[in-house]
Amino acid sequence: MKKGWRKFTLLLIVTMLAVFLAACSSSGTSGSAGVDVGIVLPTKDEPRWVQDEQRFKDALADSDYTTEILFSQGSSAKEKENVETLISKGIEVLIISPHDGAAAGAAVEAAKKEGITVIAYDRLITETDAVDYYVTFDSVSVGAAQGQYLIDHTEGNGVPLYLYAGASSDNNAFLFFEGAWSVLQPKIADGTFVIANSSVAESLKDKAELTRDEMGQILGQVTTNWDPNEAKNKAQTHLTAVGADLKGDVVILAPNDGTARAIADVFATDSDITSYVVTGQDAEKASIQYIIDGKQSMTVFKDVRTLVKDAMGMAVTILEGETPETTGTYDNGSIEVKAKQTDVIVVNQDNVKAELIDSGYYEASEFTGLD
Ligand code: BGC
């Protein structure tokens, strides 16, 4: 009996020691157990967000704070689980780019209850007061730059315009479309462009400013859901449905690079399309190659290094007990969220080398035909 107890006590001591050592080894550079800053990104399936992960890792290489990055894989349930995991690790700041801006409310409310400061990253979290800050690119100007590019690269009148948009669950999809519409609408109203694939947009062509509900109805017809496959299928359906008058030289508003490449591939294989101008955004490597090869016309370069720097800078300021600097506010449907906004750059064949290679964003060796 006595011997048994001794054995048990020894086992207990060994177990406690093991737990203690494990806690020490996961404490990272901050010296305290757990994680200081939790980062949650929407999906690993799009190069855009893998790029953000890499830029976060680069920026954190010599940080004094511990961080952990988790991906939600396009699921709000997984996103909530990720936030809960990070809460249990004792985070003080949560940086989160939601899969679905409204559905993420529940996740950030859980964080807020624990006294965690919430920073929305690139995508706003809507309809909740549980978001403290927002770091973002100027998304309305992304859409305006895309629309303006189509205008500047069009000749003549009655040019068919194909509209595509992002996912309605992403607030940015509305901001991009709002920006694009602000410059395209006068050119649709005066007959420069003829909308080829949205009866709702066609019926609203004389309205300079659309309500969110009106934009929602257009998105309902032309959304890609940020999915290149859906974009490809929609483009095929549209080209099958239209007559010869809506082919020839055309222009395409594509919301981002992943969908732009999918849509461009469909248009390139239609023998009745003689030329197309297509927009994009994100400066994804594959799209930079498409631009060099003349298969995609432009991209809107959003320098993720700056966004990461802003988000981490904000997090560190908060950890040090100070108040971060902001440059404006965004209405999320519930409160005015304090925001820090970054500008974007239009890239096409003319400046791709200067903006993306000479700036050190990518290596020249990652591309072919770059001169
Ligand atoms: C981001 C874009 C991205 C898109 C799809 C948007 O919220 O701002 O950069 O291409 O989501 O993931």
Image: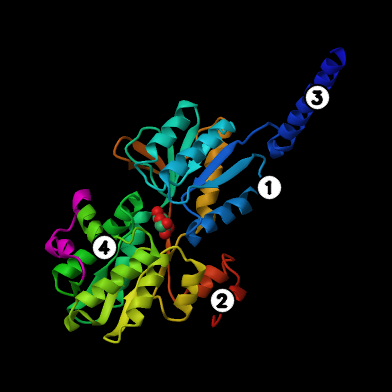
Query: Which residue matches tag 1?
Result: 62
Badge 2 amino acid:
Phe
Q: Give the residue displayed 74% in from the left and 37% down from the top.
A: 25
Q: Which of the two discs, 4 and 1, labels the residue nearer the N terminus?
A: 1
Query: Which residue matches tag 4?
Result: 222
Residues 102 and 310: in front is: 102
SS at mark 4 in the image: helix
Q: Which of the two discs, 2 and 1, labels the residue nearer the N terminus?
A: 1
Q: Which of the two discs, 4 and 2, labels the residue nearer the N terminus?
A: 4
Q: Which residues are magenta?
A: 197-214
- Whether residues under marks 3 and 2 lie with C-beta atoms below 8 angstroms apart, the answer is no
Instruction: Residue at the far top: name it.
Output: 2
User: Which image quarter: residue 359?
Assistant: bottom right
Badge 1 amino acid:
Asp
Residues 254 and 62: in front is: 254
Query: Which residue matches tag 3?
Result: 11
What whole-number distance in Å separates the C-alpha atoms at marks 3 and 1?
39 Å
Residues 130 and 153: in front is: 130
Picture disc at residue 367: 2
SS at mark 1 in the image: loop
Give the label, 4 or 3, closer to the camera.
Answer: 3
Q: Give the residue displayed 81% in from the left and 19% down from the top.
A: 9
How far across and how far down the image is residue 313, in percent?
55, 43
